[in-house]
Image (spheres, grey):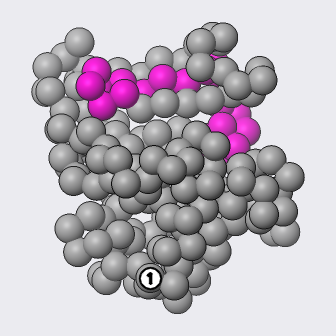
Amino acid sequence: MMKPFMMTTKVKFDPVEFGTLVADISLGYVQVKFERASKGTVSGSSVAFYDSIDDAMLFNFVDPFSTTLQGLIIHEATHALCDRNSYSMDIGESESMAYIAQCQYGWLKMPAGKRLGGGAMDGIDPLDQVFAQGWTIAENLLNGLEKGDAPLHPMYLHPMRKAVNVHPTYKDQITIRSIFNGLKRKPK
């Protein structure tokens, strides 16, 4: 039920591609690891990471039963799709795309009136701005106000990139190129 969308004319998110990613995982082209680990955790919270050098999704949790944790899987799987497609993009575009996909998933799964978020969940907190912006874009996509056959409107993309730029993890790094070099296509 998630909708495709384009960041640029050359960079597209299509949820149908998750099927090919599942095949890549089953063939060993992409590794997935769920574990309880202190490495990478921030204040004991769960974190996730996609490593494009090793073609691996790493999750610091073992029970992804909540919509929030499932959304993290969608987020990192979106990065894996970017790598699979060898997209040329910067961190701002990569993270924007992943947060929009994550928010679409959350929008479809969460009860009305609730949303994914971080920090104070007020749309102002630097941890929450990416979710507030992503939620608006997700709602527009799912309600048909944005179409997947053209890049998202700049009035949504610019605030999304700004939100990524104030997030503590990505602050002032959004113009750094993401390393999406394609999957190595060797079972690990």
Q: Is residue 146 magenta?
A: no
Who's the residue at 78% across and 63% down the image? 124
Q: With 119 as the anchor, is 158 left or right in this view?
A: left
> Looking at the picture, does residue 168 appear above or below residue 186?
below
**Segment tinted magenta in the rendering:** 51-71
Q: Residue furthest front?
A: 172
Q: With 5 as the anchor, is 187 left or right in this view?
A: left
Q: Position of residue 31 (x, y in %)?
A: 35, 21
> Looking at the picture, does residue 177 appear above or below residue 39?
below
Q: Residue furthest bottom?
A: 145
Q: Position of residue 28 (x, y in %)?
A: 25, 20
Who's the residue at 64% across and 43% down the image? 168
Q: Quadrant of residue 182?
A: top left
Who's the residue at 66% across and 11% down the image? 38
Q: With 188 as the anchor, is 60 left or right in this view?
A: right
Q: Residue furthest left?
A: 185
Q: Identify the secondary structure beneath mark 1.
A: helix
Q: Is residue 9 visible?
A: yes
What residue sits right under mark 1 in the picture?
Answer: 154
Q: With 115 as the anchor, is 106 left or right in this view?
A: left
